[in-house]
Image (tube, rainbow, N blue to C red):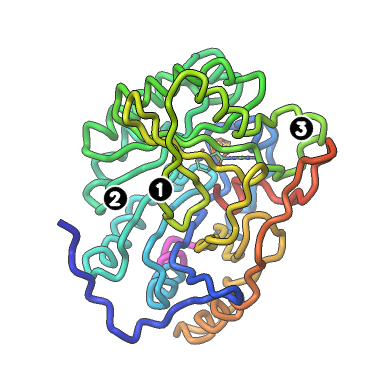
Amino acid sequence: MEKPREMPQETPRLVDPFQRPVTYLRLSVTDRCDFRCTYCMAENMTFLPKKDLLTLEELDRICSAFITQGVEKLRITGGEPLVRRGIMDFFGAMSRHLESGALRELTLTTNGSQLHRFSDDLVAAGVKRVNVSLDTLNEEKFAKITRWGRLPQVLKGIDAAQKAGLRVKINAVAVKDFNQDELFDLVSWCAERDMDLTFIEVMPMGDMDEVARLGQYWPLTDLRAELAQHFTLTDLSDNTGGPARYIRVEETGQKIGLIQPLSHNFCESCNRVRMSCTGQFYTCLGHDGMSDLRGPLRASKDDDALIKAIHAAISRKPKGHDFDYSRQKVSGQTVRHMSHTGG
Ligand code: SAM
Ligand code: SF4
């Protein structure tokens, strides 16, 4: 049974200029990763100098400040969050906000490579669900798209997560001519293992060559049409405030999410904001504009300036992203990679 919330009545709310309450923070705890997925990073990525990273104590202070301002859901991401040294101490520290009832959900997005080591600790910290990114079930293709990743290690991680009692959702980026032929295999594999599945359209982030990026784009409208040839699909009206739209596969009872930043704009219900591991605060994934929270954080031991800076940034949250692949050109491209802000 869900715990009653013990938030004081007067909890301040973060509300943006379009009257969207901001209750969801995604925090990138590192820009580093043990994989080099082709749509996400260059193989020879230059990472941030370690000295620029916020310490785990500083990340704790920032997250706690957001929680006092009404953030109820915290997703830890990266880079690969589970390669950051000491990250389990951070999860352990965040669990106090779950216990107090101020935080409803603590979760993470991971490539799964370290889940065999950390699943039990995540459960102990109060994590109930994880998103694991997996685009293919073919070992060779997996090594090709992640460059440094190995499928058996990720499958071992997923096994460990399920054994520890974590609910697993698979996120698969839909990549043209790469995993198109695995659509039905992925769907049935997730159904067999009782895992939810969400497909994501490739977003134009980072400095990838335009032709290569357009070549990766498999619109989820096409993916849905393909599914509809084999299954009876029902559009669900769940509105989680998130970017995914959901369909139910009537034959299996499965729920499938579709994140379509390009072919279906989801901005009107966006309740989320993102923070990088250096304290850069982004109120929209699709805009390069950011606010620095590291300065106010370090300027003073109390959180007044930090909280003021958070409110000021939220008051500038843009209405939506400008990603567009129409007319065979990529527009709205952001300079930063997804691994910088966290997907
Ligand atoms: N390393 C972790 C992982 O892979 O799950 C967390 C960070 S990763 C940046 C978060 C999500 O962003 C992953 O599901 C990944 O597939 C997705 N992603 C990365 N680059 C993307 C892009 N250009 N377009 C769409 N999704 C992307
Ligand atoms: Fe690493 Fe995740 Fe980016 Fe792949 S998608 S390179 S696993 S951060």
Separation of disc 2 and disc 1 at Cα? 8 Å
Question: What secondary structure predominates along the stretch shown in magenta?
Answer: helix
Separation of disc 3 and disc 2 at Cα? 37 Å
Q: Position of residue 4 (x, y in %)?
A: 18, 68
Disc sitting over residue 108 in the figure = 1
Secondary structure under tag 2 reads loop
First to last magenta residue range: 55-60
Q: Amino acid at mark 2?
A: Val
Q: Position of residue 283 (x, y in %)?
A: 60, 65
Residues tagged 2 and 1 counted as in contact (Cβ below 8 A)? yes
Nearer the camera: disc 3 or disc 2: 3
From the image, tell me which residue sits under label 3: 214
Quadrant placement of the N terminus: bottom left
Residue at image location 66% in from the left, 60% down from the top: 320
The answer to which of marks 2 and 1 sits earlier in the sequence is 1
**Viewed as shown, does residue 130 lie left or right of 210?**
left
The answer to which of marks 1 and 3 sits earlier in the sequence is 1
Q: Amino acid at mark 1?
A: Leu
Secondary structure under tag 1 reads strand
From the image, tell me which residue sits under label 2: 127
Q: Nearer the viewer, residue 120 or 39?
A: 39
Residue at image location 27% in from the left, 77% down from the top: 7
Quick check: which quadrant has ligand 2?
top right
In this picture, is 146 found above or below 293? above
